[in-house]
């Protein structure tokens, strides 16, 4: 897998084919996780990152779906 974070988030598989991630929140979760590679990111921090301190009541459930 090859991940590109500068500019648009891009993902390529082992064959070099691009994997398309359609939803913006999925891009945000991926970028957050990749930027903290090999470190634990608490779910609460991801929720804050995704919803700018105004998460919906379903935020934790949504986060599980995105991951």
Image (cartoon, rainbow, N blue to C red):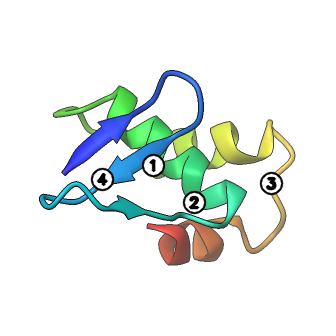
Front disc: 3 or 2: 2
Which residue is label 2 attached to? 26
Residues tagged 1 and 3 counted as in contact (Cβ below 8 A):
no
Residue 45 numbered mark, or none: none
Q: Is residue 18 above or below residue 62?
A: above
Q: Earlier in the sequence, mark 1 or mark 3?
A: 1
Element carrying mark 1: helix
Q: Nearer the viewer, mark 3 or mark 4?
A: 4
Which mark is drawn over residue 55? 3
* Mark closer to the chain start, 3 or 2: 2
Q: Residue at x 80, y 38 (%)?
A: 53
Q: Which mark is residue 30?
A: 1
Which element type, helix, strand or loop, lies under badge 3? Answer: loop
Dot 2: few (<14), some (14–19), or many (≥20) neighbours within 10 Å?
some
Q: Is residue 9 left or right of residue 49?
A: left
Instruction: Relative to 47, say whether 60 is above or below.
Output: below
Q: Which residue is mark 4?
A: 12
- Spatial separation of the CA atoms under disc 4 and disc 2: 16 Å
Q: What kind of element bears circle 4?
A: strand
Distance, label 2 to label 1, CA atoms, is 6 Å
Where is residue 51? Give x, y as percent: 78, 46
Residue drawn at the location 74% of the way across and 74% of the way down = 58
Q: Are marks 1 and 4 in contact (CB under 8 Å)?
A: no
> Splitting the image into 4 quarters, where does residue 36 fall?
top left
Answer with mark 4 or mark 2, whichever residue precedes in sequence: 4
Give the residue furthest to the top.
6
Q: Residue at x 53, y 69 (%)?
A: 66
Q: What secondary structure is found at the residue carrying circle 2?
A: helix
Q: Rounded to the nearest whole Å, what is the CA distance between mark 1 and mark 3?
A: 18 Å
Q: Position of residue 50 (x, y in %)?
A: 69, 46
The answer to whether 26 appears left or right of 35 in the picture is right
């Amino acid at each position: 897998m090859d991940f590109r974070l500068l500019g648009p988030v891009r993902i390529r598989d082992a064959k070099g084919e691009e994997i398309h991630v359609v939803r913006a929140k999925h891009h945000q979760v991926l970028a957050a996780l990749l930027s903290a590679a090999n470190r634990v990111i608490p779910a609460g921090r991801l929720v804050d990152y995704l919803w700018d301190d105004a998460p919906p009541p379903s935020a934790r459930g949504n986060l599980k779906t995105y991951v």
